[in-house]
Image: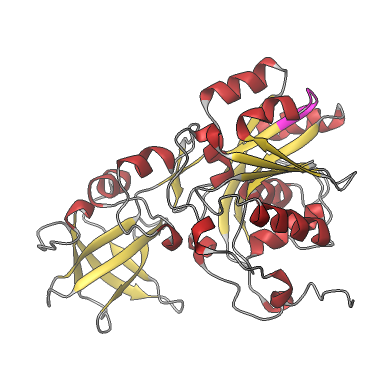
Amino acid sequence: MAEPDLNLLSSWQYNLPDELIASRPTARRDDSRLLVVDRKTGQIHHHMFRDLPDLLNDSSHLVFNDTRVLPARLFGVRTQTGGKWEGLFLNQEADGRWRITGQTRGRLQQGESLTLNKAGEAVELNGEGPELKLEERGNDGTWLVTPPSDETVSLLEEYGTLPLPPYIGRRVADAEDADRYQTVYAAENGAIAAPTAGLHFTPEILARCESRGILQSFVTLHVGIGTFRPVGAERLSEHHMHSEWCRVSLEEATRINHAKDAGQQIVAVGTTSVRTLEAAAAAGRLTAFEDTTELFIQPGFTFNCVDRLLTNFHLPGSTLIVLVAALAGYELTMEAYSKALQSKYRFYSYGDAMLIL
């Protein structure tokens, strides 16, 4: 059998039955299952997530992404016409303006306004909220708008809803989502999607890890709209990776470097932590870092910081499954996905997890 061409998007596909896409989280965060992949032996084992502290040895050093998901999905009407509009807050520019994307019937025009409604009123749009004035359209279809005040987080908290991925099937997040689509350690506002590998952790799991001497560090990457966008080229070499802002503080870079020097294994919790650490370690050693990154990690990549990975199961043909294979190897990754499918693991954001040792 011919070796697969890993530059072809078709090599990264798999068939996922709809019933394995998790639309709701498990009753408890640590009720999720955990597929453990051992790169040294090639063996794959089945566990529960609550087993994690016992699966990591005391030389492990966990690195989490502490980003917090903003209620960035917005609903409203075109002020002048009353036409329905639905959009997404992407980020706030240095000058205070918002960058948003959205959809409506017809074409938005520079100078017109959008009137926001509270997310719970999305079905009954009344056009009685604050207005966003459309000022400048980007080449990518996004808009720069002037918000009604500089209290961005407060406005989003009042009028927005958590931007759940489309495969979850809910346009408006409910009370369960408000709790479970955030990690228990979320601290830094800025993401429009959750770093989903971290959703399994409970305060009890974190405490058990700490009691075993497993150290913990925190970095930040604000997950952006690129996480929703599929690879747009058939060849990975032609794909332009999306940009995301991330940060590693000097204090955490120093702690993680000391851990590496002491022979500890750096366990990245989620692909976003991997991108952050490897962007900050591009010169060979982890340094303090605060910038955007377009790092696309593929097989053949040299990892300068990350030794192990805890991650969820990702969409076929996504840059995330490619990243996983860069660490675990293509054949072992696809075998792990095959076994997860056979054993009916739950996939995607609210799904189960995989630990690559």
Q: Does the stretch in magenta take in 22?
A: no
User: Is residue 279 in sight in this rendering?
Assistant: yes
Residue 249: image location, x then y, percent: 63, 36
Please tell me whether the stretch drawn in magenta is mainly helix, strand or loop: loop
Q: Residue at x 34, y 49 (%)?
A: 71
- Furthest toward the bottom, the residue is 106
Q: Is residue 343 above or below residue 231?
A: above
User: Is residue 296 in sight in this rendering?
Assistant: no
Query: In the depicted view, which residue is nearer to us: 315 or 19?
Result: 19
Colour basis: secondary structure
Is residue 329 shown left or right of residue 124? right
Q: Number of numbered discs present?
A: 0
Q: Quadrant of residue 338?
A: bottom right
Residue 126: image location, x then y, percent: 9, 62
Q: Residue at x 42, y 76 (%)?
A: 138
Residue 175: image location, x then y, percent: 30, 41
Q: Is residue 27 above or below residue 89?
A: above
Q: Quadrant of the N terminus?
A: bottom right
Q: Does the stretch in magenta take in 60?
A: yes
Q: Is residue 11 above or below residue 226?
A: below
The residue segment tinted magenta is 57-61
Query: In the depicted view, which residue is nearer to us: 241 or 148?
Result: 241
